[in-house]
Image: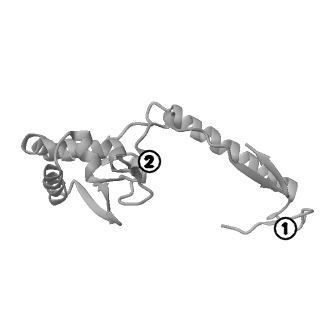
Amino acid sequence: MKSILVTEDKNIFNEQSFSFAERIEQLEKLSEKDLERAKREKNSPFSRWTQFNNDHTRELIWLALKYPKAHAILLFLIDQMDDFNAVMCSYRVLEEVLDVGQATIARNIKILKENGFIAVLKSGSSNVYAINDKIYWKSWGNNRKYSKFPANVVLALSEQEEEYQISFNDLEYIKHKEVIKGEELEN
């Protein structure tokens, strides 16, 4: 990447020199392009698609028949994973979503790990599940990445402190004061 020079006036002898006004215009155009791209992606019928490699159909049929709970966990993780094939959630989330106990989750996560469907990485006391990108992926096929982060984080309301276990609709608005250049404003 080449360096650019931004100054009050453009240096006509340096093609990488721009005035402040020119640079602002360039950045605004880039921002508009980013917004247009994001809008296209959001409206794309493919925004919620996950790609699947048919070379692994046999393994997935085996998993579904022999370990249906592990298959359900895998499908939940695939549904929640981000464009980098990763999702962070606790056992509690999996227990609540799938309506099974912790021992069932632990046993079936182990099956998924041992058979190469997922990798389990630690982030403090939470698990980050990286789905094998040779089987499923969300980004373009030539842009697959395995275990790259950030990851989507899925939280269970029941794991949160009691003060957060209420509906946001039940929260009261609290007035606060802001001080701006010595003036006090009330919001």
Check disc 2 and give the amino acid type. Answer: Glu
Q: Determine whether 35 is above or below 107 in the image.
A: above
> Residue 185 in the image: x percent, y percent?
79, 47
Residue at 41% x, 54% y: name it: 151
Residue 155 visible from this viewpoint: yes
Judge left or right: residue 161 versus residue 132: right
On screen, residue 66 above or below 43: below
Where residue 53 sits, quadrant-wise, is: top left
Q: Residue at x 13, y 53 (%)?
A: 103
Pick the quarter of the image with the C terminus.
top right
Residue 135 showing in the rendered view = no
- Mark 1 sits on what residue? 14
Spot the residue most to the right. Answer: 9
Dot 1 alpha-carbon crowd within 10 angstroms: few under 14, some 14 to 19, many 20 or more: few
* Colouring style: one colour
What amino acid is found at the position of numbered circle 1 in the picture? Asn
Q: Position of residue 44 (x, y in %)?
A: 49, 32
Q: Nearer the viewer, mark 1 or mark 2?
A: 2
Residue drawn 39% across the image and 48% down it: 162
> Splitting the image into 4 quarters, where does residue 15 fall?
bottom right
Q: Is residue 9 left or right of residue 25?
A: right
Residue identifier under label 2? 163
Measure how far apart labels 1 and 2 are at the Cα level. Answer: 59 Å
Percent across and percent down for residue 119 are: 26, 60
Among numbered discs 1 and 2, the one appearing first in the sequence: 1
How crowded is the residue under tag 2: few (<14 C-alpha within 10 Å), some, or many (20+)?
few
Q: Quadrant of the N terminus?
A: bottom right
How far from the left and from the top, in percent, is residue 76?
28, 42
